[in-house]
Amino acid sequence: MTVLATIFAFVIALGLLITFHELGHYLAARWCGVKVLRFSLGFGQPLFKKRLGNDQTEWVVAAIPLGGYVKMLDEHEGQVPAGERHRAFNHQPVSRRFAIVAAGPVANFLLAILLYWLLFILGVSGVKPILGEIEPATPAAVAGFRSGDTITGIGDQPITTWQEARLLLLDNAVDKNADVRITVTGESGISRQLRFDLSSLGAEDIEKDFLGKLGLSAYQPIIAPVIDQVMAGGAAEHAGLETGDRIVAINGKGITTWEEVVTVIRSSPGRILLIEAIRDGQELDLSLQPEAVSEGSTEIGKAGITPKIEHALLEGLLVKTSYPPAMALAKAATKTWEMSYFTLRMLGKMVTGDVSLKNISGPITIANYAGQSAQMGLAAYLGFLALISISLGVLNLLPIPVLDGGHLMYYLIEMVRGAPLPERIMYIGHQIGVVLLVTLMIFAIHNDLLRLVSE
């Protein structure tokens, strides 16, 4: 996907999420009788502004699209005419101030429910959770998994896709659960109950391919070594390979499957490979030098090619589930709650060191995911938007001063003690919050840059 398309998908995502968040604050303020002076999408120099409504609220689109804000009439931010003091934010009862601040994150959760609702009505596609080869001497081998088994349940939860299986296994892995009940159906159609020990995984394992560490992998069908797409500017294009080419040998060794192609290329970073291919019935001899890229602590080769997969073969491995509107809404609400709780638990595990801080992502990684999901189609993009909206809602509820959660913490204390905290304490809290937020952003961007370099 082009850089411009990725940026466009990212800007659309940011615009939607920020708009809903700030609309939550705006609508709650209006319902509580508070005068709104400005509604801004973005920070910095205004690119567009217009005054609307009886209050002449200024609607602004600014140059830096990494946030937004709703500015309300407030004596802490300027003089308020005596006739409008009853409409100032700081003159509202603490319950109303709490509702106005909480409405932003709540709007993000409601947006996630809406997006998941649309997704469940359109239909959710996924790969069937069929197991490939089980690595010997791994937790999966000890548990009794077999190649060709289909995972049908984890605990009390039914499983239909690899995505569901991965998420539930990850949920148990971060808790180091040593006795996870797994239901599988073998190739013979007979179901078995297995006990899976996930306690051996460390924080660094969670960040990487934790399923591989456990000995699990998805079933890979036998795919012919025929090229479908060649990445522009990649090693394969430089070598002269084209769509439709069939690779028949590498360095003189015969090739019959795409998996063999991948194995040789991944194990040959920077080394020249002699490729024998057939194009339109003609034999070709080409030289391919896979690009050396980092994958965790190892270096692998990358050619920039994808295989041609028969449609019938692909259809047999996919499952698509859709629901009527009412059931879709119930599932959307449940999914939003589950993902919110999971996100909060992952943040807690990062604090305790059970999950690596390398999992924190910044704007570069999010932009990359936005582009990838948009390229995969509407359903993938809707799922991405819902997940980011949940993350934004959870993040804003953290009790860190300068975030919505920090203000809500102050209001809860005010409700208990019957009076606001002293201005000095709130000022110090604000400064601490700024430092924490800036540190978090620097750390997230640092992780982004490390991922960018390793790709």
Image (cartoon, rainbow, N blue to C red):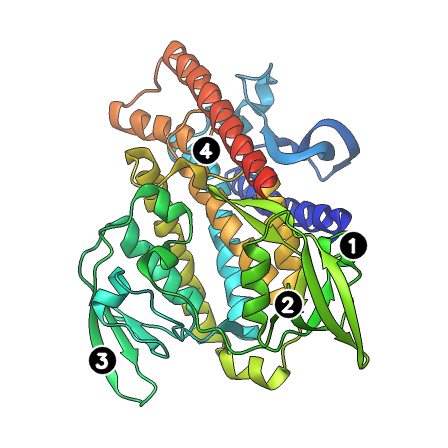
What is the CA distance from the residue labelled 3 to the residue labelled 4? 48 Å
In this rendering, does residue 109 appear at all?
Answer: yes
Q: According to the image, label 2 marks what residue? A: 252
Judged from this view, the residue extending furthest toward the bottom is 188
What is the CA distance from the residue labelled 1 to the residue labelled 3? 50 Å
Check whether the beta carbons of the residues at disc 1 and disc 4 lie within 8 A of each other. Answer: no
Identity of the amino acid at label 3? Arg
Identity of the amino acid at label 2? Gly
Q: Indicate left or right for 82 with 171 as reference.
A: right
Identity of the amino acid at label 1? His
Q: Tell me the mark number nearer the camera, choosing from 3 and 2.
A: 2
Label placed on residue 238: 1
Identity of the amino acid at label 4? Asp
Marked residue nearer the N-terminal end (1 or 4): 1
Marked residue nearer the N-terminal end (3 or 4): 3
What is the CA distance from the residue labelled 1 to the residue labelled 2? 21 Å
Q: Tell me the mark number nearer the camera, choosing from 3 and 4.
A: 3
Q: Tell me the mark number nearer the camera, choosing from 1 and 3.
A: 1
What residue is at 71 percent from the left and 45 percent from the top? 7
Q: According to the image, label 3 marks what residue? A: 192
Marked residue nearer the N-terminal end (1 or 3): 3
Q: According to the image, label 4 marks what residue? A: 404
**Which class describes the residues within 10 Å of circle 1: few (<14), some (14-19), or many (20+)?**
some
**Which class describes the residues within 10 Å of circle 3: few (<14), some (14-19), or many (20+)?**
some
Q: Indicate left or right for 57 with 148 as reference.
A: right
